[in-house]
């Protein structure tokens, strides 16, 4: 006989889980009671949101399912932002929540929340467990849905009496899904149509999203892009899928994309989309997005098609299958000569206006940081101006090397996510870049970092504002800086010291010369090479802005490069 | 077909699904998250599964989006869009002529129950 809690842990082990993140409480206590000796390591964060973001970080860097655990009521509601984030960014995640005992469900009992109902629109699949006998099957099914197709979040809600009860248990269940008629709709004849579209195209481009990474098809994608040799750019989640050294690669596209990428996107007559959702941060004003283009959309999730832009040719299926099929066909035909188009799109007249960030010390600081990182590194960016600067300056060819909350844009994501990344990759240098606003949303996780002795390199770009909102206020609200002033920020160096984490400050005047002074370089090197957790606060000019920027309602070609 | 000035049409959707926890709610969510009113909804068992029929006033673009969203729901089996039947439209009217009026006393008693 095993208790329900023990069955849960056995089933987690059967799914390959050896690391979970969580925070205990009344309704989930039986699970915590059974943890010891279960083979599942539990990481105690200081807030449930920290737990779910850490689980996301673990999942994003490994491709495995991340697991977060919380109690009922407030514990469960504190997971919701992370669940929404995982939904937007296709992160395989299983959240396990305790629930009040079955007899009390629906009575507004202490710490009762209908988390199943709350998260229906955010989860890919969820269950409120109603009997101990179904625990094994529910967990097997939950993990299946979290990692299959377009990955996403799953919620499993366990009434406390289910965790306490006992039953016979032999082995963890396996789950075989029903197939849908829709599953068989993979278009096998797309290659012929696509080749015809390519042969007609004068200005083809490729847009790379996260799909190829999630499908494990990065190598195949790179080979295909080398064959096509057409101007190529990436979404923020596509960064790293294409080597930045590829001669046809133009960087990030979208609201803060590169000039070259946005111009090519606007001028193209054939847009090949590989695993991207085409959300509004990528398209700008949808009615003016790629106005001359026909669109071919490689996508695993049909629900992502035609949301913003109708595509002429949907290619539905796992990119690990559709990309090689297309590449094989491309290898059989003589593609048109697009050298003139490539020369224009990738040419020097469209290069970045300020390649060394000479007018923007924060960009130079990030360049210095990134260039001094060891090859084996992962960069996490929180949400805001620093996120876009970091994305613009990211120069690695590591497919899972740049991690950020892209779809939901959840401030406070980076620090706890970095915990998950560092635990998954103990030998990797993990650099976590936050703003002064975002870091304070989950700053309590410094305690987790210290307790575990994780050598995470934490950077706070401190401009004493909610910088991205302030930038919009400056550009579009006549500098009415309503409620974005953070000039009374605490001293982050002192805060870190209170957590017994070494910290120091770097002023932007130390980035005034190029290359930076040796003393400044040494500070950065020591910071990156320390075997301990480290915090570096970089003082950023309060009114530094992210450029280029595509204003709301504008086409991608209508970027602004400075305040008008 | 009834068209609105915004190019919307009243459209019927027939969605077959396995009646597992939350599946019907996920189906309805696809409409409610778009701010669509659901003037007609009928869910019923059919053979070994269930079917829900919805009437929604939608644009042609929304028809495709909704169908794809529903197909992405784990336990949805099949989605079909169709022209609504006359009696469905009649039932979906804001105040159906045949609506039984509930007396104030009955309402009060129900609220206290």
Image: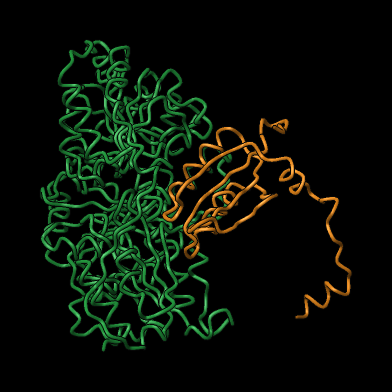
Chain colours: A green, B orange
Residue at the (40%, 64%) spot, across then down: A440
Residue B90 placement (x, y as % from top left): 77, 45
Q: On the image, which quarter does residue B86 sit in?
A: top right
Name the quarter where the N terminus of chain A is drawn.
Answer: bottom left
Residue A543 placement (x, y as % from top left): 43, 44
Q: On the image, which quarter does residue A10 sit in?
A: bottom left
Residue at the (38%, 82%) spot, across then down: A28
In the picture, measured across the screen, residue A144 lies left or right of residue A70, that is left
Which is nearer the eye, A142 or A335?
A142
Residue A559 placement (x, y as % from top left): 43, 28
Q: On the image, which quarter does residue A489 sit in?
A: bottom left
Is A418 placed above or below A479 here? below
Is A331 placed above or below A448 here? above
Is B91 placed above or below B103 here? above
Residue A365 placement (x, y as % from top left): 25, 46
Q: Is residue A504 visible?
A: no
Which is nearer the eye, A395 or A64?
A64
């Amino acid at each position: 006989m095993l208790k329900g809690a023990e069955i849960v842990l056995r089933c987690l082990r059967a799914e390959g889980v050896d690391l979970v993140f969580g925070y205990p409480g009344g309704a989930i206590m039986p699970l915590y009671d059974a943890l010891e000796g279960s083979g599942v390591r539990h990481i105690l964060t200081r807030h449930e949101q920290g737990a779910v973001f850490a689980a996301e970080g673990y999942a994003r860097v490994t491709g495995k399912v991340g697991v977060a655990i919380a109690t009922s009521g407030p514990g469960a509601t504190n997971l919701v932002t992370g669940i929404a984030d995982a939904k937007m960014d296709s992160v395989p995640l299983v959240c396990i929540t305790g629930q009040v005992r079955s007899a009390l469900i629906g009575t507004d009992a202490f710490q009762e929340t209908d988390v199943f109902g709350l998260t229906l629109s955010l989860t890919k699949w969820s269950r409120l467990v109603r009997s101990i006998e179904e625990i094994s099957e529910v967990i097997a099914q939950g993990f299946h849905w979290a990692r299959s197709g377009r990955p996403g979040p799953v919620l499993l809600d366990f009434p406390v009496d289910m965790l306490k009860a006992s039953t016979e248990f032999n082995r963890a269940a396996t789950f075989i899904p029903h197939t849908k008629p829709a599953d068989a709709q993979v278009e096998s004849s797309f290659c012929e149509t696509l080749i015809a579209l390519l042969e007609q195209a004068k200005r083809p481009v490729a847009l790379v999203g996260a799909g190829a990474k999630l499908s494990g098809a990065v190598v195949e994608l790179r080979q295909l892009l080398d064959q096509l040799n057409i101007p190529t750019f990436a979404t923020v989640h596509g960064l790293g899928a294409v080597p930045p050294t590829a001669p046809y690669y133009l960087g990030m596209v979208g609201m803060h994309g590169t000039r070259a990428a946005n111009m090519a996107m606007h001028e193209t007559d054939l847009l090949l989309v590989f695993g991207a959702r085409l959300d509004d941060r990528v398209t700008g004003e949808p009615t003016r997005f790629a106005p001359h283009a026909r669109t071919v959309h490689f996508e695993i999730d049909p629900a992502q098609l035609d949301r913003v832009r109708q595509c002429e040719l949907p290619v539905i299926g796992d990119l690990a299958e559709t990309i090689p099929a297309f590449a094989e066909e491309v290898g059989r035909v003589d593609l048109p000569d697009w050298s003139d188009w490539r020369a224009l799109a990738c040419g020097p007249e469209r290069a970045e206006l300020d390649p060394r960030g000479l007018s923007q010390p924060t960009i130079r600081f990030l360049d210095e940081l990134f260039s001094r990182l060891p090859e084996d590194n992962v960069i996490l960016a929180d949400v805001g101006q620093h996120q876009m600067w970091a994305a613009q300056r990211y120069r690695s060819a590591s497919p899972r090397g740049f991690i950020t909350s892209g779809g939901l844009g959840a401030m406070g994501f980076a620090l706890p996510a970095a915990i998950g990344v560092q635990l998954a990759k103990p030998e990797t240098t993990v650099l976590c870049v936050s703003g002064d606003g975002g870091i304070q949303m989950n700053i309590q996780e410094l305690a987790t970092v210290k307790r575990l002795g994780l050598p995470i390199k934490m950077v706070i770009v401190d401009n004493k504002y909610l910088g991205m909102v302030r930038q919009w206020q400056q550009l579009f609200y006549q500098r009415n800086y309503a409620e974005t002033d953070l000039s009374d920020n605490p001293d982050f160096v002192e805060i870190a010291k209170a957590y017994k984490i070494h910290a120091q400050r770097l002023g932007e005047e130390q980035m005034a010369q190029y290359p930076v002074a040796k003393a400044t370089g040494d500070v950065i090197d020591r910071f990156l090479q320390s075997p301990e957790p480290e915090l570096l606060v970089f003082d950023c000019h309060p009114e530094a802005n992210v450029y280029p920027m595509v204003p709301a309602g504008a086409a991608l070609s209508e970027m602004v490069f400075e305040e008008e | 077909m009834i068209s609105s000035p915004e190019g919307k049409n009243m459209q019927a959707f027939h969605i077959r699904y396995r009646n597992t926890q939350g599946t019907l709610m996920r189906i309805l969510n696809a409409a409610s998250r778009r701010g669509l009113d659901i003037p007609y909804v009928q869910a019923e068992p059919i053979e070994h599964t269930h079917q829900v029929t919805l009437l929604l006033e939608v644009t042609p673009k929304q028809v495709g989006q909704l169908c794809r969203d529903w197909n992405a729901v784990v336990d949805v089996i099949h989605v079909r869009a169709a022209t609504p039947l006359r009696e469905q439209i009649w039932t979906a009217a804001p105040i159906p002529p045949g609506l039984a009026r509930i007396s104030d006393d009955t309402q009060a008693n129900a609220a206290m129950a």
